[in-house]
């Protein structure tokens, strides 16, 4: 359970609501809103509501599900888009071969089954029968081969290309069977195939010049009807969807609004059925309403990135001192009301390290000062800390980190930048230190290798290279047995936290807020909305 208890949350709600005196005799009956926690713990939050008889819900079909969020779609080509808002729509339009269950284990999707060769260098996929694209054409192995060759083509600029470069060739045995021949064993490729950026598209649609932003060419539960950038994205049910009985609603509308507060206002006005919230302060206010709130531990995380190429941090002892000077739980409590857990470098549930085994995860100012002395930086250490504006969690984290480091004799100057400027400088690694919230992924190789392998496509941002770390990452990727993989990733996390190229802080939660009439949704820790295909409306 979190250090910030629900009693404290209730107290904060009271403060937000004002200080009006309570009546001597309560005139309301209390019901509860259930907050579903990913780790299967359930917490109930008392809220005042009008009592009405609770009918036994009977599954109903029809209606349009209206989803509100502050981010807009930037495009709908599943192989090119990486923004979360685009991916949340794409995963309803396009299906990958595999997907994840609620425990983030890889399970079949368009693939009915898969089989590894004895040497682990050939992966054979058997496709489901009777799967149809939105235009009515059947799915075949040729579409699968075409989709992955499109991803691997440099000209596509595919978001997931780096995860599939171990594919040597793709062979079609028959319309339902496709084999991926690999250059080397790659245990992460199954999880990579479950990503929306690895979705299967219609070969006929793409080669005939189809426009992804005007019509859809997938097998997903919904198909594209209309996209008005900045306003609304409208989807309608795919009547020939391959899962019998799904989807249960007639359509989905994604509404783009100004911010999380506007999402909550629309939910309270019953304009929206479903809201995607990122700001815990708004979620806190939502708990005073008769709304259903799901909370799943996010794979994304918050980190203090230290640029090892800059003079301030080119000595590992200085970076270690920063880690020892910080109480990560204090950062979490003040930046996110304790809504999360202190984390190591890997956030997938099975591969999480025990943080008590990692370097300086307990604050030690004495050790921090000694490390600075040993590095000849006992006085005068000062650096700039870059962060984006309009992110209250990172802003609160930055202020707390600044305060904590000052107690250890280290000064920081906060650089708060407009998001576009911040993103440009972050991508170029143009900073002494930066606060950021990178995405996670269910497989640790997909999550860690791009940053920490010396050939990783975004290693330039991490700006840290270690030959031994390269060997461990390669070993982890080539190990198929999860029980044998886990100790390798424990070593990787220990090596990273010993060297402190970053200070990993905490992971939070993904929140979905729904009207009580929205039923059947199961949240996933990767933030996916794929299970919206199972939603039904009790109204």
Image (tube, grey):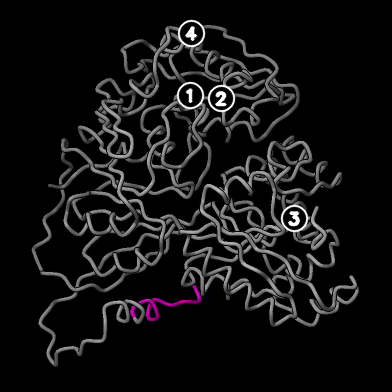
Task: Check contact, mark 2 vs mark 1: CB within 8 A.
Answer: yes
Q: Nearer the viewer, mark 1 or mark 3?
A: 3
Q: Residue at x 59, y 25 (%)?
A: 157
Q: In terms of sequence position, does the residue under pointer 3 or pointer 2 come before the other?
A: 2
Q: CA distance from mark 4 to mark 3?
A: 50 Å
Q: In terms of sequence position, does the residue under pointer 4 or pointer 3 come before the other?
A: 4
Q: In terms of sequence position, does the residue under pointer 1 or pointer 4 come before the other?
A: 1
Query: Dot 4 corresponds to which residue?
Result: 175
**Magenta includes 5?**
yes
In the image, residue 528 lies at what x, y percent? Answer: 43, 43
Magenta residues (range): 2-10
**Magenta includes 479?**
no
Q: CA distance from mark 1 to mark 4?
A: 13 Å
In the image, residue 364 lies at what x, y percent? Answer: 74, 79
Query: Dot 2 corresponds to which residue?
Result: 114
Q: CA distance from mark 1 to mark 3?
A: 42 Å
Q: Residue at x 15, y 70 (%)?
A: 49
What element does badge 1 sit on? strand
Query: Dot 1 corresponds to which residue?
Result: 111
Dividing the picture into quadrants, the one containing residue 45 is bottom left
Query: Dot 3 corresponds to which residue?
Result: 307
């Amino acid at each position: 359970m979190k250090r910030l208890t629900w009693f404290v949350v209730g107290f904060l709600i009271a403060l937000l609501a004002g200080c009006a005196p309570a009546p001597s005799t309560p005139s309301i009956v209390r019901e509860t809103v259930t907050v579903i926690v990913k780790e299967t713990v359930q917490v109930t939050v008392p809220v005042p509501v009008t009592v009405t008889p609770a009918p036994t819900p009977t599954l109903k079909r029809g209606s349009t599900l209206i989803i509100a969020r502050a981010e807009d779609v930037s495009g709908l080509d599943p192989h090119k888009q990486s923004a979360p808002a685009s991916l949340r729509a794409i995963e309803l339009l396009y299906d990958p071969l595999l997907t994840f269950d609620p425990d983030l284990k890889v399970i079949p999707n368009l693939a009915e089954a898969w089989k590894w060769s004895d040497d682990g260098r050939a992966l054979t996929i058997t496709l489901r029968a009777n799967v149809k694209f939105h235009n009515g054409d059947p799915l075949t192995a040729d579409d699968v081969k075409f989709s992955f060759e499109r991803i691997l083509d440099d000209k596509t600029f595919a978001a997931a290309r780096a995860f599939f470069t171990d594919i040597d060739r793709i062979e079609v045995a028959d319309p339902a069977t496709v084999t991926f021949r690999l250059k080397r064993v790659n245990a992460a490729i199954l999880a990579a195939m479950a990503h929306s950026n690895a979705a299967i598209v219609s070969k006929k649609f793409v080669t005939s010049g189809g426009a992804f932003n005007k019509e859809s060419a997938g097998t997903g539960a919904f198909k594209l009807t209309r996209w008005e950038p900045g306003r609304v994205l409208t989807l309608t049910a795919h009547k020939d969807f391959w899962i019998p009985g799904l989807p249960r609603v007639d359509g989905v509308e994604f509404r783009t609004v100004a911010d999380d507060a506007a999402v909550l206002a629309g939910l309270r006005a019953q304009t929206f059925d479903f809201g995607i919230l990122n700001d815990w302060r708004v979620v806190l206010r939502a708990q005073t309403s008769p709304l259903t709130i799901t909370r799943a531990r996010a794979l994304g995380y918050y980190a203090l990135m230290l640029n090892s190429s800059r003079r301030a941090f080119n000595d590992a002892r200085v970076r270690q001192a920063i880690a020892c000077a910080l109480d990560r739980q204090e950062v979490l409590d003040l930046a996110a009301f304790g809504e999360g857990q202190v984390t190591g470098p890997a956030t997938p549930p099975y591969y999480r390290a025990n943080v008590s085994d990692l370097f300086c995860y307990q604050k030690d100012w004495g050790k921090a000062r000694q490390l600075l002395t040993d590095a000849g930086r006992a006085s005068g250490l000062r650096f700039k800390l870059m962060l984006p504006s309009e992110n209250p969690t990172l802003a609160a984290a930055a202020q707390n980190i600044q305060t904590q480091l000052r107690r250890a004799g280290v000064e920081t100057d906060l650089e708060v930048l407009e998001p576009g400027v911040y993103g440009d400088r972050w991508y170029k690694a143009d900073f002494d230190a930066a606060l950021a919230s990178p995405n996670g992924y269910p497989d640790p190789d997909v999550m860690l290798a791009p940053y920490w392998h010396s050939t990783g496509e975004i290693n330039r941002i991490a700006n840290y290279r270690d030959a031994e770390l390269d060997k461990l990452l390669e070993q982890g990727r080539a190990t198929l047995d999860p029980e044998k993989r886990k100790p390798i990733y424990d070593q990787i996390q220990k090596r990273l936290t010993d060297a402190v190229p970053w200070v990993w802080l905490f992971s939070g939660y993904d929140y979905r807020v729904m009207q009580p009439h929205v039923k059947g949704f199961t949240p996933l820790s990767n933030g996916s909305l794929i299970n919206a295909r199972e939603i039904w409306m009790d109204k």
